[in-house]
Amino acid sequence: MARELKKVTPATPPAPVPNRTFSDYLNFEEQLPKKKQKQVRTWVRTAIQVLFFLFLPSAYSSAFNGVKYLFTQVGAGAVIEWTPFVAILVVLLVYTILFGRFFCGYACAFGSLGDWLFALQKYIAKKTGKKPKQLSRTTAKSLAGVKYVVLTAIVVLCFTGLYGKLTGWNPWDAFSMLHARNFRLGKHVVALVLLLLLMVGMAFEERFFCKFLCPMGAVFSLMPTLPFFSLFRTRKDCLNKCSACTKVCPADIELPNSGTLSVRGECFQCGRCAGGCPKTNIHCGVSGKTEKGKRRLKGNELWFVVLRAALLLGLFLWLGV
Ligand code: SF4
Ligand code: SF4
Ligand code: SF4
């Protein structure tokens, strides 16, 4: 009787263990699936925003006090002293020149409040099946210049010494008092009403206050920014007809028709465009060669987000914010 031959299936060789380099671990983000990359970015950003909101909410008003102090002193012909407010303002301006408006995207309590109110409105609209409300992009763009008018008005008021006579109207004071659980707002009724109006605006238009009204935002937009942390995207590398990055951009920054766009000025450095790009075509300006021989950071921007946040936190703690 012929013996039946057993069919032997050759054992599948074990998959080779990838030789990961140190740079692979640094670039962990690029190795994650696209959806996960976006989630990780969102979690990291939210964690940083919550941290600064809870523990350093006064950074915004301190820097703004620095601006007011400078122009009041200049208008009065008085000596400008190195006060804590001036120190915070100078540090934030230098930080913005080096790293762009990271403070706006991650660390400003007022900006974060705007993000959360807008997210809440979107969530409610989704749950109720309504379309989230927002201004048309043309209107939003035409209103972006109003913040420079606000800044000019404040500078003139400080310069002429009138600003000091206006009390009880400043919405930031009302915000600081509420944050500190000080509810004695009797002398700040106007400020409270203005704050509530701003919050309504923030809920219905993403970064309403930042884009249209914030005097500090106007100052930051005017600052020159070094290219290392600006976001670059090269148009020819884009997917056909894609506009995912412009749709999520709270600053309404457009794509160029051609060439490479380096985003500065109005950009809050929130990173949402980079997180949502289906082609991973948006990167900071350091490390990783590009076609033009420039250096770009590719795939490990997240580490630099954490480093920038840690540096800012250290600076604020050092300044006693
Ligand atoms: S624009 Fe003004 S309010 Fe908005 S995040 Fe920047 S400093 Fe804060
Ligand atoms: S360009 Fe990108 S990083 Fe800048 S504000 Fe728009 S989405 Fe945020
Ligand atoms: S999301 Fe990416 S691929 Fe799409 S337009 Fe923007 S940069 Fe180009």
Image: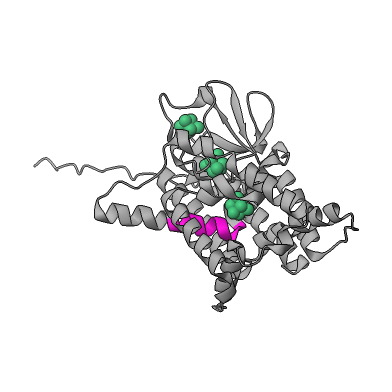
Magenta span: 107-117
Residue furthest left in the image: 1
Quarter of the picture holding the C terminus: bottom right
Q: Is residue 20 visible?
A: no
Q: Is residue 77 magenta?
A: no
- At 85% from the left and 52% from the top, the residue drawn is 74
The one of 285 and 182 positioned closer to us in this rendering: 182
Residue 317 image point, x, y percent:
73, 67
**Is residue 111 in the magenta section?**
yes
Tell whether 265 sits left or right of 234: right
In what quadrant of the picture does the N terminus appear? top left
Name the residue at 58% across, 62% down.
171
The residue sitting at 72% across, 53% down in the picture is 157
Q: Specify the quadrant of the image occupied by residue 266.
A: top right
Q: Quadrant of residue 261?
A: top right
The answer to whether 40 is drawn above or below residue 9 in the figure is: below
Q: Is residue 72 visible?
A: yes
Q: Main secondary structure of the magenta part?
A: helix
Q: Horizontal and vertical percent for residue 33?
A: 42, 45
Taking depth in this image into account, of 194 and 205 the one nearest to the observer is 194
- Nearer to the camera, 163 or 304: 163
Residue, x 27% and y 56% (percent of image)? Answer: 127
In the displayed structure, does residue 193 sit left or right of residue 145? left
